Image (cartoon, coloured by chain):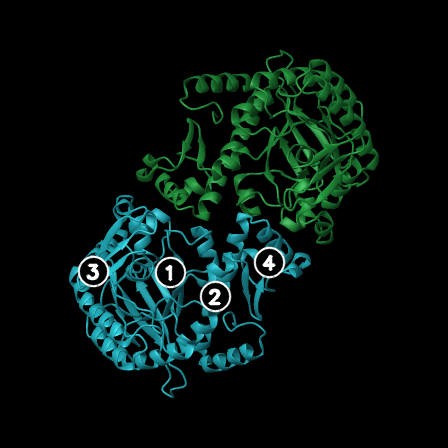
Chain colours: A green, B cyan
């Protein structure tokens, strides 16, 4: 067992990757201020201090161990100082388990109308009212410390991995390194961990440089950023096959930001990743698409209006326990609020149970077999690979 | 104790109105195919086979004893035959307690684009797609029997009570009587009760005539329709003071359709009404207005953004147990789906607990004192009388 001893976060690998090189998948325990998390773990995203349509009881029921909240959104509304005055983000949203905050880097760099990046920080306009704001590494850390998440992450400059010129990627990557040091210097909240972020686009040498630069700093964990964007699955895997081996003897948790489909998570676990987050399962659910082992069901399809079966036989979720596909198909057509909750509960349960199955397979030494089984299933599925699980 | 013995519904008055004439409020038990309901009772409305934003567990938690579903909406979407094939409305929406269906009369007469009323029925256009449909008394009963509610009601012709000419009211009332007999003749589902509906607008003689006509027929209960519209509270009370005394020795439950504010319900219970339904508590909740004993809180008001208190101290609802006014004020501004559920839970809990308090007061013989206390409170409240409770 390897473990980091840096308070306020302790990570221990209970089942390391096997020596035979068949996989880099590993099992671990992440101990945070608000409890312990088994890895590999998927974190649902609670952008505005709520995982859309769910309350904390629902999150416990779907089996969420830890959630992510968005620094950019909470900074703009309702404001980090307000949340701090109200007792911090955990109390504000009544979630007593671990929370990870992102840095706002992705949002301010990629989502805003105006975004001007300079060496000191980023000037951007609010998507809510067009007002002008500025984030620096220090400001991002200040906001995250006020929110009081268990894990904060460095302010970085992600760029679209596939469509960015090498010089743009190189500049952003080196700026991210300089900002990482400033984040470390600014961070002083003792009950909150800080993770560094690797950038480098799809460039092997820049990913190598970035992994070495970030791993050299005393972060509690290592994020791999700038993926889950416009790259292909093969390009993403190639990047992970550069970064993760460089961290093979590093005792810290590895977090790939923004990935959310079962097939993608399976591949990234195989590549040695421990933590994930994405809005994908909840977003496709709200759009009417529910994940099942055979692929996915689009409940807007008329054939479900008379289907008395649950979405997924044997599923433990709130939607499948009580309701038919016919009822859910009715709710989505009537644009009923209950649909969004039930659909989100199902897709999150599906993905979280899939992660539990991954952990069991790692514990039993059968993870490579699970990867082969899923690949075979995806090959015969009629749907896209996204939901194969 | 007076009781009706007509299966499938049994109503027993456990505490009759006192002989001193201080109130006509009474306590009763309504035994239906899906369980027993204490009256006076408020029924939340599940228009599209869902009480908006809530699931059946939420309905149990707020204390709903019985709900109403809309025949017109379910006939149009997903279709009553479809619901019948799927095992009926209870199974479809996973609600195992009593359901009352309205007749569709209110919707087809008042809501449609085209509506042509003749002696045989009503031709109307769907609000969903403009398609042409026709409801007759027999068709309304057929739809309600297919849905399988515990209590069905007669197809009637309500008219706006205040703004309708006497001749219009008289025609609609007498047509309603003719339709009542046709509904009785058409109804043959043995596990479902059928209630008749009194009309008559604000005309004392027409209300008298209608009460006598409907009470003379072997319905399991008596609805008072054509109120909760554009009349004043005083006009409504005057109508109830005509109808209910005529039913003083009638053993059947009395149901005033469409009324939903605490102050209005208190007055109607005092007038001798046993059953109520309304979308009001849920609709105002979704609009950001939460009911409290002191009046109401509009959570869109900026002053709540920093308020750490629950909406209502001591309230047992899901919103008040875990969250601050500040959090709810944040959710409503961010248009987060969770807001609609939490706000609806609060207002329904508020109203259902208010009905429980009314029942306790009746049982203890202190109902007239409760009426005086609420009137005094409303007089000093800064808000409108709607939420006083």
User: What's the chain of the residue with tag 1?
Assistant: B
Mark positioned earlier in the residue sequence (1 or 3): 1
Q: Quadrant of the N terminus of chain A?
A: top right
- Circles 2 and 4 on the same subunit: yes
Measured Cα–Cα span from mark 3 to mark 4:
44 Å
Identify the residue under disc 4. B300
User: What's the chain of the residue with tag 2?
Assistant: B
User: What's the chain of the residue with tag 4?
Assistant: B
Tell me where residue A235 sits by quadrant.
Answer: top right
Identify the residue under disc 2. B351
Mark positioned earlier in the residue sequence (3 or 4): 3
Mark positioned earlier in the residue sequence (4 or 1): 1
Tell me where residue B195 sits by quadrant.
Answer: bottom left
Measured Cα–Cα span from mark 4 to mark 1:
31 Å
Q: Secondary structure at mark 4?
A: loop
Identify the residue under disc 1. B66
Are circles 1 and 3 on residues that touch, CB within 8 Å? no
B274 vs A143: above or below: below
Of residues B268 and B322, which is closer to you in this image? B268
Measured Cα–Cα span from mark 2 to mark 4:
21 Å
User: What's the chain of the residue with tag 3?
Assistant: B
Measured Cα–Cα span from mark 2 to mark 1:
14 Å
Q: Secondary structure at mark 1?
A: loop
Are circles 2 and 4 on residues that touch, CB within 8 Å? no
Q: Secondary structure at mark 2?
A: helix
Crowding around mark 3 (Cα neighbors within 10 Å: few <14, some 14 to 19, many 20+) is: many
In the shown orientation, is residue B24 left or right of residue B353?
left
Give the number of the mark in front: 4 or 1. 4
Give the number of the mark in front: 2 or 1. 2
Measured Cα–Cα span from mark 1 to mark 3:
29 Å
Mark positioned earlier in the residue sequence (2 or 4): 4
């Amino acid at each position: 067992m390897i473990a980091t001893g840096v308070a306020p976060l302790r990570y221990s690998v209970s089942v390391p990757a096997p020596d035979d090189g068949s996989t880099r998948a590993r099992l671990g325990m992440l101990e945070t201020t608000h409890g312990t998390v088994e890895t590999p773990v998927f974190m649902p995203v609670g952008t505005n201090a709520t995982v859309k349509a769910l309350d904390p009881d629902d999150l416990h029921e779907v089996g969420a161990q830890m959630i992510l909240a968005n620094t950019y959104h909470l900074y703009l509304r309702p404001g980090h100082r307000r949340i701090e005055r109200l007792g911090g983000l955990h109390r504000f949203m009544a979630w007593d388990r671990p929370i990870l905050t992102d840095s706002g880097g992705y949002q301010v760099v990629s989502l805003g109308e105006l975004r001007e990046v300079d060496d000191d920080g980023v000037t951007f306009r609010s998507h809510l009212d067009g007002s002008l704001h500025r984030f620096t590494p220090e400001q991002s850390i200040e906001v995250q410390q006020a929110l009081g998440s268990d894990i904060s992450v460095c302010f970085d400059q992600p760029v679209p991995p596939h469509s960015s010129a090498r010089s743009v990627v190189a500049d952003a990557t080196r700026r991210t390194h300089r900002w990482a040091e400033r984040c470390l210097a600014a961070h002083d909240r003792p009950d909150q961990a800080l993770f560094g972020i690797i950038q480098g686009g799809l460039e092997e040498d820049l990913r190598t440089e970035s992994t070495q630069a970030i791993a050299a700093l005393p972060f509690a964990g290592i994020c791999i950023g700038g993926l889950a964007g416009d790259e292909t699955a093969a390009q993403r895997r190639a990047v992970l096959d550069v970064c993760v081996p460089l961290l093979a003897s590093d005792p810290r948790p590895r977090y790939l930001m923004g990935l959310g489909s079962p097939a993608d998570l399976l591949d990234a676990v195989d590549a040695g990743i421990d933590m994930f987050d994405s809005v994908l399962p909840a977003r496709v659910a709200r759009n009417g698409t529910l994940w099942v082992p055979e692929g996915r069901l689009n409940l807007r399809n008329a054939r479900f209006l008379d289907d008395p079966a649950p979405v997924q036989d044997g599923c433990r979720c709130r939607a499948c326990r009580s309701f038919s596909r016919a009822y859910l198909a009715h709710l989505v057509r009537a644009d009923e609020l209950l649909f969004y909750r039930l659909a989100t509960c199902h897709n999150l349960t599906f993905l979280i149970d899939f992660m539990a199955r991954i952990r069991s397979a790692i514990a039993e030494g059968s993870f490579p077999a699970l990867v082969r089984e899923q690949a075979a299933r995806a090959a015969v599925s009629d749907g896209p690979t996204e939901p194969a699980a």
